[in-house]
Amino acid sequence: MFNAKVAADEAAEASRAIAWMQTSAEYQAILSQTFKTAANQLQEAVFDESWTAAIEQFGQKGLNQLPNAIILDLDETLVNTLSYRASLVLNNNEHEEKRFQNWMNVERAPIIPHVMKLIEKAASLGVTVLLISDRVCKPTPRDPCPVKTQTLRMLKRISIAFPKDQMFFRGEYSDWNKDQTSRREFIAKRYRILMIVGDDINQMIPQVATLPMTARQKLTAQYDEMWGSRWFIVPNPVYGSWLDVLPNDIKKSLNPKTHTPTGIR
């Protein structure tokens, strides 16, 4: 009985989060202001030769000799996979890589509203758009990263084309794991990273994916000047590293007392 109640509670929580992202005007407004602000900020970034959005490039010499790029997260930043998440809830299923791959093969993942404002601005300034994804590469004899091939086909169905070498997937190399630091380090040797846009602070801050809540809050506050200029976060209450570090009983993370998040004044 207890397990059934827990499962029902989790399904209800997921339903509310998915419904908010699929139906709320507030979510649409956040996307509009985020991508509009990022696009407006990009021109300043291009012409400031010392500008970087990557902690991995702080203090690095010769940044202005590298080609300019921005990093976009894939799911829920470039494309919308919420219909997959909704199908999991409605069919009482859990996320599995195989189930997600089957979904990718047949479905169209619509583009996130307003993201093209940023992509078009980048193109007009000669800035390369790079994609980072935690979709997991599992090589076969015929394809070193089948999920990347599937993703390219999915993007083609919505008329978006990216070269394979501008997409960086989890597991392509042995050290490209859940923490995205190693992928940013790889990119930082090849591009000047002007901006990072995603739905998880793991996409911006090194070694944060498994840190406890209070440590994540402190780091977010520590880099406060980066938000809204070099880093842009879009909301995702459905999944992410924020959820992974919560206690199994989410209610234990709730605080009925008035408080300010750690590190915020």
Image (spheres, grey):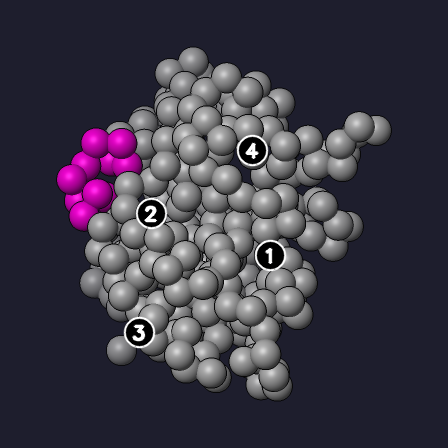
Q: Residue at x 16, y 40 (%)?
A: 25
Up-down relation of residue 171 to residue 143 (above or below): below
Q: Residue at x 37, y 16 (%)?
A: 90
Upstream in sequence: badge 1 or badge 4: 4
For the residues labelled 2 and 3, the Cα–Cα distance comes to: 32 Å
Q: Which residues are magenta?
A: 20-29
Q: Secondary structure at mark 1?
A: loop
36 sits left or right of 56 in the view: left
Q: Position of residue 42 (x, y in %)?
A: 35, 68
Up-down relation of residue 9 to residue 66 (above or below): above
Viewer can see residue 143: yes
Q: Secondary structure at mark 3?
A: loop
Q: Return the mark for residue 151.
A: 4
Q: Quadrant of residue 59?
A: bottom right
Q: Position of residue 88 (x, y in %)?
A: 44, 21
Q: Return the mark for residue 180.
A: 1
Residue that lies at the very extreme toward the top in this rendered image:
91
Q: Secondary structure at mark 4?
A: helix
Position of the N terminus by quadrant: top left
For the residues labelled 4 and 3, the Cα–Cα distance comes to: 39 Å
Upstream in sequence: badge 2 or badge 1: 2
Viewer-side residue, 171 vs 129: 129
